[in-house]
Amino acid sequence: MKSRVNPHYMEKLYSFYSPFYDYVFGKLLGPGRRQAFKYLNRRPYQKVLEIGVGPGSTLEFYPPQTAVIGIDISASMIDKARKKAAQLNSGSHFDLQVMDACQLEFPDNQFDAVMAAYVITTVQDPHQVCREILRVVKPGGQIIAVNHSRSQNGNFWGRIEDLLAPVCVRIGFTTDLDVIQVMKHVGITVQQAVACNLLNTGKIIMGTKR
């Protein structure tokens, strides 16, 4: 089931955001990103895919000797991320590419871990993105998504999120998507969800591929 998100609109919007994304959204969403890295395995020589790498907000948090492939639909975001990667001396390797999360250009079972921060609620087909995540991660690999996820049906906040969705989608995301259920529906084994960000408005959702 596709959402109300228009991918062309989102590409243009996040390209517009790229010069000041970290200054605005970094303050609101950065805590969840940083907290998510506490759950990433610290083994050396891992191959990690980050979907929605944006301007490279998370590159400094990767453990040394990690091979990081970062993708984003916005070329402007990737340009910013490449400049940031060039300034880091963390011992990790960064390969940053413009790519559609719904059509990942990687073989099956390729990555030890997939990170996706604030992505699933910004795409037109969240089920397809989650299917692609499941396809490219290795069996037993980590899947870590950081996202708002709609409250349960019948919950007061769920109804508020439904009302806010048409407004919020204009600024870059939707509030009426139950991300956890989408991940489960495509076959991701969801192991844990931890609240994050101001007022616990986000979740760090951890899963794997059986």
Image (cartoon, rainbow, N blue to C red):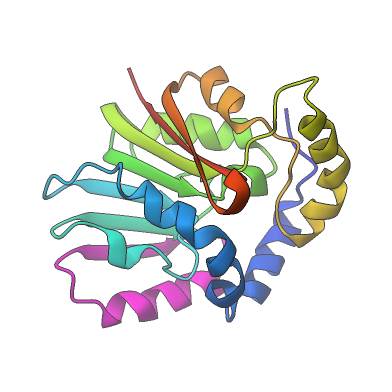
Query: x, y (%) of residue 103?
Result: 52, 43
Residue drawn 61% across the image and 73% down it: 24
Residue drawn at (37%, 64%) of the image? 96
| Magenta-span inclusion, residue 57 | no
**101 shown above or below 53:** above
Q: Nearer the viewer, residue 197 or 161?
A: 197
Horizontal side of 166 relative to 187 (left or right) equals right
Q: Residue at x 50, y 29 (%)?
A: 131
Which segment is the magenta one?
73-98
Q: Residue furthest front?
A: 199
- Disc tally is 0
| The C terminus, quarter of image | top left
Q: Is residue 84 magenta?
A: yes
Residue at x 46%, y 46% (from the top left corner): 116
Q: Position of residue 36 (x, y in %)?
A: 38, 47
Establish if 139 lies above or below 82.
Answer: above
Q: At which x and y percent is residue 85?
A: 31, 74
Locate residue 37 relative to residue 64 in the image: left or right: right
In the rendered image, which quarter contains the N terminus?
A: top right
Q: Compared to 159, does 203 lie above or below? A: below
Look at the image and tell me whether residue 103 can be seen.
no
Relative placement, left or right, of 176 versus 87 is right
The answer to whether residue 75 is above or below residue 192 is below
Q: Position of residue 4 (x, y in %)?
A: 80, 42
Is residue 200 rendered to the left or right of residue 187?
right
